Amino acid sequence: MSGISIEDELLKRAAYFEDILGKALPAEEGYARTVIEAMNYSLLAGGKRLRPVMMLEAFKLFAGEEADDSVLRPFMLAIEMIHTYSLVHDDLPAMDNDEYRRGRKTTHVVYGPGMATLAGDGLLNLAFETAIKGAALGKELVYYDGDTSNRYLAALDVLGTKAGIYGMVGGQCADICAENNHDMDTETARDVLHYIDENKTGALIESSLMIGAIIGGASEAQVKQVEKMGSNVGIAFQIQDDILDIEGDAAELGKPIGSDLKNDKTTYVSLNGMDEAKKKVKELSDEASEILKSFGQSGTFLEGLFEYLIYRKK
């Protein structure tokens, strides 16, 4: 990684995924054209593409740097579709009611709340259509020592679980229930917040890394370590997001700051203070890097990416 910044490398990898995404967009035609337009508008809103990039890097970690990644691409697309649908729904008036995302008008502002809701639904369903077709048509993979020996089924299980009520949706539920609830004692509030950060944000990062590892040939024990690594990165990423909501620059972030305060949300910063929040981000990221090094990998892009997330400004 010497001589090349992590941000430049991330942009290069994101561009690689953008090419894959561009070829996979559904055609904007027929009576469903408007909802497909809204879906594509949401998918093409930019962003770092962290989840598919992480998935690909985890795949290479076990399959090798030169391995054919075509077998992974349907899952890379699926995770980005799921992430995007969650953002579309988060921005809705009934949720965070945000008007800008990544520097552009949010989907509900452009297409209306009803069509934006359908666009999110469509993206979630398309994600599983894409992943299932990839699993059905993909080349045969080596035996997996998990609950199923089929790596595609194991990956689909992770994708579904981490995106659902035992993952991201569960975290979003806890987040909504915690809003304006000031009756919790501090210890309970910390426990609830950890659950929210672990699931609302962490689950899709865990999913990305785990699926990459599973398809790449990792053992079940290694996948469990990858899951822990992803949990740390996900929680650190969310705490950094909380920090940026206070200290960030709206123009750089591409969205207004202060939404947590506006919505009276409990965050790691509000519970523990800014200094402790920054310390926790560093601690979690360092631990994730140690797990990565346990796989015999040091100085990799993935390790640099984890560190980069600590200091990101957007």
Image: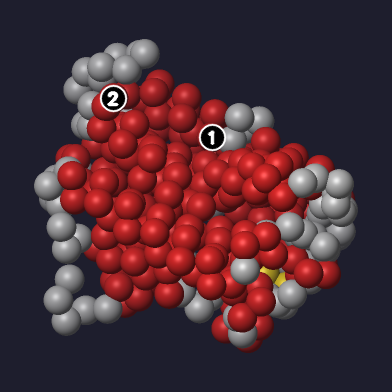
Secondary-structure class at tag 1: helix
Seen at 41% across and 55% down, the residue is: 284
Residue 285 in sight: yes
Q: For mark 1, what is the residue?
A: 162
Picture quadrant where residue 261 is located: bottom right
Question: Horizontal placement of 235 versus 226: left or right?
Answer: right
Q: Amino acid at mark 2?
A: Glu
Between marks 2 and 1, how big is the CA–CA gap? 17 Å
The residue closer to the viewer here, 237 or 158, is 237
Picture quadrant where residue 93 is located: bottom right
Seen at 69% across and 65% down, the residue is: 270
Numbered badge on residue 220: 2
The location of residue 303, given as percent across then percent down, is 26, 60
Question: Horizontal placement of 137 versus 28: left or right?
Answer: left
The residue closer to the viewer here, 3 or 186, is 186
The residue closer to the viewer here, 157 or 120, is 157
For the residue carrying disc 1, how many other residues have a C-alpha within 10 Å: few (<14), some (14-19), or many (20+)?
A: many
> In the image, is residue 2 above or below residue 138?
below
Seen at 48% across and 52% down, the residue is: 234
Question: Horizontal placement of 43 versus 300: left or right?
Answer: right
